[in-house]
Structures are given as C-alpha cells and as structure tokens.
Amino acid sequence: MVALAVAAIGLFFSRGWHRFKNAPRRPIVFLPEIAIVLAMTMYLLGPIGAAIAARFYGVSPPPPTAEYALDDQAKLVLGTYLGQSIVLVVLIGLTMKAGRASTDSRPGWIKASLTGAGTLLLALPLILASAAVASVVASLVRGQAVDPIAHETLRMFIREPVDGWYIAFGAMVILIAPIMEEVLYRGLVQRTLVQVGLPRWWAIILTSLAFALMHMRIVDIYVLPALFVLSLGFGWAYEKTGRISASITMHILFNAANLAVALLTSSPTAT
C-alpha cells in the first residue's frame, strides 16, 4: 500500500494535477462575510437541533461510562442535520437568486462527480497507507494492538441489531453527512479562504485540518492523519472542478465503502 501511495503521489505531480492554473472560477454568489456568518450559524444550529431532537424523542444522556444506543444517536444526528438544513436552504436560495453567470467555465455536475470518484481512487492508497502507518505507531506507543474499527459510529453499526433506525442512520451516514459536511467545509470555509486571497493549497490544508479535528470526538486519534489526507482529496476535487458535487460524490463513496468494509470484516461469518 505504501508503494501504491508513492506511485499515486508520483502520478499526481508528474501530470501537473497539483497546479490550479487552469482551474475554473466559481461564480460569486455571496460575499466572504456572509459565508462566515452562514458557517458559524451552521455550527450552532447542529447542537441546537440535536438538543431539540433529544427533548422531542425523550433521549437521555447515557451514564458516564456508557455510550448512546444506535437509535438514540440516530435521533440526535437527525436533529443535527435538520437544524443545519436551514443554512442549506438559504444557500440554495442565494444560488438560485444569483442565477447562472456568463463567465461560468465549470464542468457540469455529472462530469465533476466523476472527477470526485476518480480522485477517491487516486487518493485511496494514500489514505490507507497513512492509516496503516499511524496505527503501527499508535500500537508501539500503547504497547498493544489498536482497534481496527476506529470510528465510534462504525462500532455502533457492528454491535447493534438491524431495525428502522439502523437503516435510517445508515442513510444519514452515507448520504446526508457528506452533503452537510461538504457544504460547511468546502462550500463555506474553504471557498471563503480562497475568496479572501489565500492560495488554494493553503485553503485546502487549513480546511482539512479543521475537518480532521472536528472528528476527534468520534474517532481514535491515530485515524486523524488518514482523515486529513482524505479531506485534502475532497478539497482538491472541489477546487479543480469548482463544483461541490465533486467532493460530495467522493465523500459519499468513501462513507459507503467504509461502512460496507466494517460490516463485512466484522461479520461472524467473515474469515
């Protein structure tokens, strides 16, 4: 995997894909100041939505040594996304009001989505290699093997029985989470950093740091390097196409594959 990662890096730089000289310019739909307000609002609406969902569904916090059951966690996440969807509706309204700019040179959303899928294939060896190296280092530091399932959400899907909330939560993880996270991190944060004059790669790196650190609550710390590399791919696909559909597609495919692999490798019949 490390050899494949080195080959992928070599291909990436030898083909000049790291340059953004010919990257399409995105139409200006809203000013950076508005984007900052929308990003902060989206951050705040998440916990507010979760709190409302907890009250509506009667979800109580678990004991200090326990964790939420999958159905309770699904209800909280549903509330989070419903709260954040308010910003999504505002963004759609602003985009429709702005209309299509005559200078828009971006590829169509289908072509951009295919670019996102291709980016995942190219980035996958780097993601897996960084995860493998980080897990080896973590094992040496801890003096014992680390859990290969390093994401709390994946652990929930492995240990809980299948029911309606199980399926609904799976749909949210695969489809809704990528949309919300990409709108926030690429569509608002990264886009704003570029708009205010930061070089594209610096905007991608800073956004990816925020993306990785945001997951600290639900993943083991040694997974953060892999999440950072994954987010670099999201950011690159977004900047290269100018379309958020590229990073959303990449994110959806990764989440779906990650969940599938976790369930298959943890099945009692798996060998």
Image (spheres, rainbow, N blue to C red):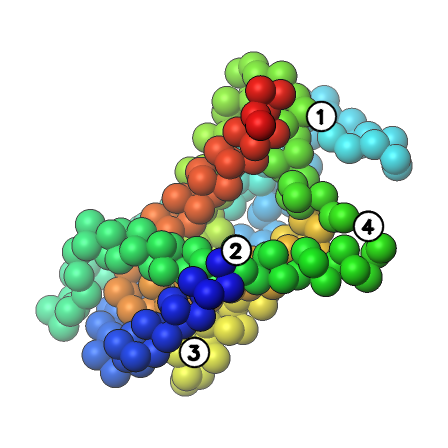
What residue did someone put label 2 on? 128
Mark 4–mark 2 distance (CA, rounded to whole Å): 20 Å
Mark 3–mark 2 distance (CA, rounded to whole Å): 22 Å
Q: Earlier in the sequence, mark 4 or mark 2?
A: 2
Which residue does the image show at 17% across and 61% down from the upper left?
107
Q: Earlier in the sequence, mark 3 or mark 2?
A: 2
Mark 1–mark 3 distance (CA, rounded to whole Å): 40 Å
Which residue does the image show at 53% across and 29% down from the upper left?
264
What residue did someone put label 4 on? 144
What residue did someone put label 1 on? 69
Residue 256 left/right relative to 23: right
Q: Amino acid at mark 1?
A: Ala
Q: Quadrant of residue 192?
A: bottom left
What residue did someone put label 3 on? 201
Residue 181 spot, x, y in % from top left: 49, 52
Q: Earlier in the sequence, mark 1 or mark 3?
A: 1
Q: Earlier in the sequence, mark 4 or mark 1?
A: 1
Q: Amino acid at mark 2?
A: Leu
Regarding mark 1 in the picture, which secondary structure is present there? loop
Label 1 packing within 10 angstroms: few (<14), some (14-19), many (20+): few
Q: Amino acid at mark 3?
A: Trp
